């Protein structure tokens, strides 16, 4: 890591104790501008949010909590499909038409809603409110906003490692505390 890249971004949100600025893959080596950093931060925040949902979904479904009713017109219930990666691949996985619907819905969200829209008053990279949703964010002072953004960033980082760990353990087999048999 070059000292110029380290010095340029060491005061950014997410450069927190005990590691400080941490770029183990060297994605910010060389002549890197703020635009490149913002793109990487945008991707980190988005992956963190997705990982938080994935981790929560793993824990909830493994606890036996499923949506009520049927997943299709054939009458298959939501709990008739396996949890985790086995729901996507394997002999008892969700049918291909169901996976296509999931991918299409996620694509619709990506293209239509989950993006920064310039000129709508977004305060930071990854702010998807786009002038529509507030939930009290505008009532916070700047220090509280910065703290909450740091909390989201750290929770996203933890969730990325957490869901990766759950997927690895699922493939290895065995039992994980709280989650149970995988």
Image: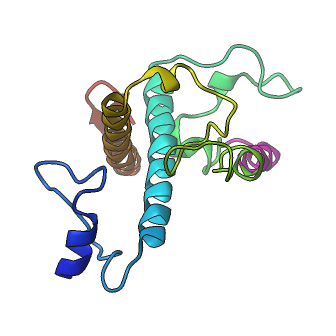
The image's colouring method is rainbow
In depth, the one of 49 and 89 nearer the eye is 49
Percent coordinates x, y for residue 129 in the rendering: 62, 36
Q: How many marks?
A: 0
Q: Relative to 23, does residue 75 appear above or below in the rendering? A: above
Percent coordinates x, y for residue 90 in the rendering: 60, 50
Q: Relative to 8, does residue 12 appear above or below in the rendering? A: above
In the image, the segment drawn in magenta is: 94-106
Q: Is residue 1 visible?
A: no
Whether residue 95 appears in magenta in the rendering, the answer is yes
Percent coordinates x, y for residue 82 in the rendering: 57, 34
Main SS of the magenta part reads: helix
- Going by the image, does 25 lie left or right of 6? right
Q: Is residue 115 visible?
A: yes
Q: Quadrant of residue 121?
A: top right
Q: Quadrant of residue 68?
A: top right
- Going by the image, does 144 lie left or right of 134? left
Q: What residue occupies the far left of the structure in this picture?
A: 18
Q: Relative to 85, does residue 136 appear above or below in the rendering? A: above
Q: Residue at x 45, y 37 (%)?
A: 52
Tell me the quadrant of the picture where the C terminus can be found.
top left
Q: Quadrant of residue 20?
A: bottom left
Q: What residue occupies the far right of the structure in this picture?
A: 73
- Going by the image, does 173 lie left or right of 121? left
Percent coordinates x, y for residue 142 in the rendering: 36, 33
Q: Relative to 92, does residue 171 appear above or below in the rendering? A: below
Q: Residue at x 51, y 39 (%)?
A: 84
Q: Residue at x 44, y 46 (%)?
A: 48
Whether residue 131 appears in magenta in the rendering, the answer is no
In depth, the one of 156 and 12 nearer the eye is 12
């Amino acid at each position: 890591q070059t000292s110029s890249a380290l010095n340029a971004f060491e005061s950014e949100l997410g450069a927190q104790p005990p590691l400080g600025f941490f770029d183990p893959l060297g994605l910010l080596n060389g002549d890197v501008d703020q635009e490149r950093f913002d793109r990487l931060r945008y991707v980190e925040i988005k992956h963190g949010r997705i990982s938080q949902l994935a981790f929560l979904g793993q824990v909830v479904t493994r606890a036996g909590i499923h949506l009520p009713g049927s997943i299709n017109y054939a009458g298959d219930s939501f709990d008739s499909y396996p949890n985790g990666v086995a729901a996507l691949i394997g002999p008892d996985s969700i049918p291909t038409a169901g996976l296509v619907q999931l991918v299409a819905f996620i694509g619709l969200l990506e293209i239509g809603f989950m993006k920064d829209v310039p000129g709508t008053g977004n305060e930071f990279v990854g702010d998807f409110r786009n002038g529509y949703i507030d939930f009290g964010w505008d009532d916070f002072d700047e220090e509280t906003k910065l703290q909450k953004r740091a909390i989201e960033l750290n929770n996203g980082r933890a969730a990325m490692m957490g869901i990766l760990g759950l997927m690895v353990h699922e493939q290895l087999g065995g039992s994980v505390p709280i989650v149970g048999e995988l």
